[in-house]
Amino acid sequence: MTPNAKLSACFPALVAGLLLLVSYAAGNVVMTDSPNTVINIKNVEQTSNCTVCTNISGCSSETSFKLPASISVDFTCLQPQMVFTVEISREIVCTDLSCQGGVVPSDSSIYPEFNRTFNWDVKAQSGKAFQVDFLGSGMRQILSSETCPDQQTYTIVIYQRSGRVTIGTFCKDGLIRSVRLLYKGRLSLKLPGQAPMDPSAFDITVGPDIKGLAEVAVQFPLGSSNVTLFSPNFPLGFPSNDLATWSFSVPPKHNFTVVFLGSTAPQCQKKSVEVQYSGQNLGLSTSLSDPQPALRQGDFKMSLVNCEVNGGSGLSLNFAVSVSRRSSPVPCLVDLQQEKDLTLYIKKKDSTYSPCEMKVDSIIQDGITMQSGTQFNLSFQDCGSEDIMLTAIKSIDLRVCSGQKSCPADEIPLTVPTLDQCLPVPLQTITWNLQSLQGGTIELRPPAGGLKQSLAGQECGNRLFLTVRDGGGVPLGTFCPRGPLQGIKMPANASIVTTGAGSLGLSSTKESLLNVSFSQEITGKQGWPGQGFPHGGISKRCRNVLRMCVLIDEQNQWALALQ
Ligand SMILES: *[C@@H]1O[C@H](CO)[C@@H](O)[C@H](O)[C@H]1NC(C)=O
Ligand SMILES: *[C@@H]1O[C@H](CO)[C@@H](O)[C@H](O)[C@H]1NC(C)=O
Ligand SMILES: *[C@@H]1O[C@H](CO)[C@@H](O)[C@H](O)[C@H]1NC(C)=O
Ligand SMILES: *[C@@H]1O[C@H](CO)[C@@H](O)[C@H](O)[C@H]1NC(C)=O
Ligand SMILES: *[C@@H]1O[C@H](CO)[C@@H](O)[C@H](O)[C@H]1NC(C)=O
Ligand SMILES: *[C@@H]1O[C@H](CO)[C@@H](O)[C@H](O)[C@H]1NC(C)=O
Ligand SMILES: *[C@@H]1O[C@H](CO)[C@@H](O)[C@H](O)[C@H]1NC(C)=O
Ligand SMILES: *[C@@H]1O[C@H](CO)[C@@H](O)[C@H](O)[C@H]1NC(C)=O
């Protein structure tokens, strides 16, 4: 009987086709674009006599074939997925630059209803390393005897001259970001029937050179977290005279502590077992029974170095690293009940990488807006001026002058508000929004010492500077303290942005920065030239600053901002 005749005799039977051509008809034509892949289909139920049949090798309890191929595959029973498992193996060869033949999306449609094991057999250039990157949510390590809760278990082994070494067994969702491996190894993924294979869960790339068997990279997030790790081949012996490394990335302003949970020591013929630590703030060698680093800071690497082993139970180590913030949150009650028309803004400069945590009423926020008139219950943890910006906007209504030819002599001082000491950074910038009537002039008078104009791009050395903007936000000019100018006149509605330099911000500025007043005198095009200047005529020094002209009078004492 030819295989085909037998198939016809046995069916109607279930046919599981390869790849996208899943079909339940006999004699299915099978095509695939999965390159260089070996498929093994095996009956794992001793009690079942169900066989798998191909038009190349006939029927048996197990078959293997290499893709790409056009093969017809059938089973002699219904529901073969209850009896057979499928193993899908692919070779990945790395050059100096890249690793070719990796995961392809169509792999996820190979026999999806069967229990599958995917094997990626990776070979780097001689003496070089390759790297498995766990993308997305990372991985955590489990004992090789355990299975993952989602039944999707990853295993990494490498092949050494001395034999096979299991680097670890891993489940989704954890702090392990990558594993670097020397020369030749296998990444396996066990998937139960129906579970989808996620081709984007990891990537295989050329690794930087490593020392020893493997380097497992762990990245801790901000806040409290911990990781549990096992030495290669755990609980059996670590290879003689070899080493493995774990590298840990610890966020700034966090403490880490290493704890050995369990270990076995080998009988050493030569040398001794060592645990070596290196890092920004750490250079240390310990034994398995020594205390390990506690409450230390910064990124670090830990290497487990075996001796030349003389039989015995072998070296094994199970350890944990826990990380937590170094400080505790500092409460800060900001009281703006006495302030008027003031809004404070606190914003994180970079919400991803900063260790700073701000809370309003115990809820974490990346930005806080506080209007005057009430109180705010904040807390700050690890927030410095490199992490957050504190700015303020104050509105001042000059329209009280309405109806009068010239405004009253009373000038309104612009002073930097005194904020609660508990705020972790000083006020960086305050913007005064001055509202006035149409067609008048706002006069700004600096206190003794005067002002000087700063031409585009030049700031005021290490001191604060003022930027004057019109009502539409267009900058009219930038001014520094100390200079010949005794005042600035400008058209109605304006804002004055004062920015403090350096880490002190505006905190050291106690006295009034400017006095502001409003008059109905006309400046601007209608009044030009000369009007509005106490000293009459204008010098022809028209200093072009962005879209406007700043005119300085003959005695160099007044600036007139024209639009
Ligand atoms: C097996 O069957 C497929 C589909 O019918 C066909 O394309 C292929 O040529 C067959 N191979 C052999 C060796 O008969
Ligand atoms: C499989 O085994 C059952 C008994 O377990 C038997 O009745 C049946 O004929 C066998 N089928 C084949 C194809 O050998
Ligand atoms: C498939 O996997 C499940 C769970 O992982 C297991 O219970 C079942 O026995 C397996 N079936 C086969 C045919 O291997
Ligand atoms: C480790 O982290 C888990 C949660 O991720 C927590 O439940 C456990 O208490 C932590 N263990 C230690 C020792 O900090
Ligand atoms: C972090 O470590 C430092 C010493 O390095 C210690 O003073 C501080 O209390 C530790 N913080 C926590 C939260 O354990
Ligand atoms: C601020 O919050 C803390 C903790 O959430 C609370 O104990 C305190 O009473 C609050 N203070 C005010 C003024 O709301
Ligand atoms: C100035 O601002 C006020 C309030 O925003 C507005 O009512 C007024 O029209 C503005 N005046 C000018 C000249 O733009
Ligand atoms: C600013 O105004 C205050 C009164 O509000 C006055 O005492 C002070 O002399 C003024 N300063 C200048 C430079 O005009």
Image (cartoon, rainbow, N blue to C red):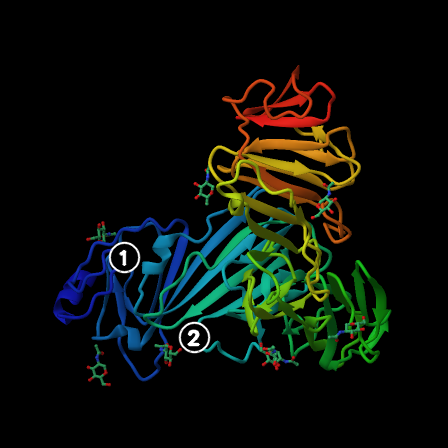
For disc 2, the marked residue is 150
Q: Residue at x 33, y 48 (%)?
A: 33
Is 401 located above or below residue 348 in the figure? above
Q: Mark 1 falls on what kind of element?
A: loop
| Residue drawn at (67%, 29%) of the image | 457
Label 2 Cα neighbours within 10 Å, binned few <14 / some 14-19 / many ≥20: few
Report the amino acid beneath label 2: Asp
Going by the numbered disc 1, the residue's amino acid type is Ile
Quadrant in which residue 551 is drawn: top right
Does residue 477 show up? no
Which sits in the foreground, 32 or 376? 376
Q: Where is residue 373 in the image (x, y as percent from the top left)?
A: 55, 65
Q: Does the residue labelled 1 lie within 8 Å of ligand 1?
A: yes
Q: What is the spatial separation of the Cα atoms under label 2 and label 1, in whole angstroms?
A: 36 Å
SS under mark 2: loop
Decide: marks 2, 1 in contact (CB < 8 A)?
no
Residue at point 64% right, 61% down? 217
Instruction: Name the residue rendered at 33%, 60% in the picture.
Output: 110
Quadrant in which ligand 4 is drawn: bottom right
- Which circle, 2 or 1, is nearer the viewer? 2
Whether residue 23 is visible to the viewer of this picture, yes or no, is yes
- The residue closer to the viewer here, 357 or 299, is 357
The relative height of residue 379 versus residue 249 in the rendered view (above or below) is below
First reached walking from the N terminus: tag 2 or tag 1: 1
Q: In the picture provided, is 559 more to the left or to the right than 278?
A: left
In the drawing, does residue 113 fall left or right of residue 227? Answer: left
Q: In this view, does 546 lie above or below 23?
A: above
Residue 549: image quadrant is top right
The residue wearing badge 1 is: 56
Is disc 1 surrounded by few (<14), some (14 to 19) or many (20+) residues within 10 Å? few
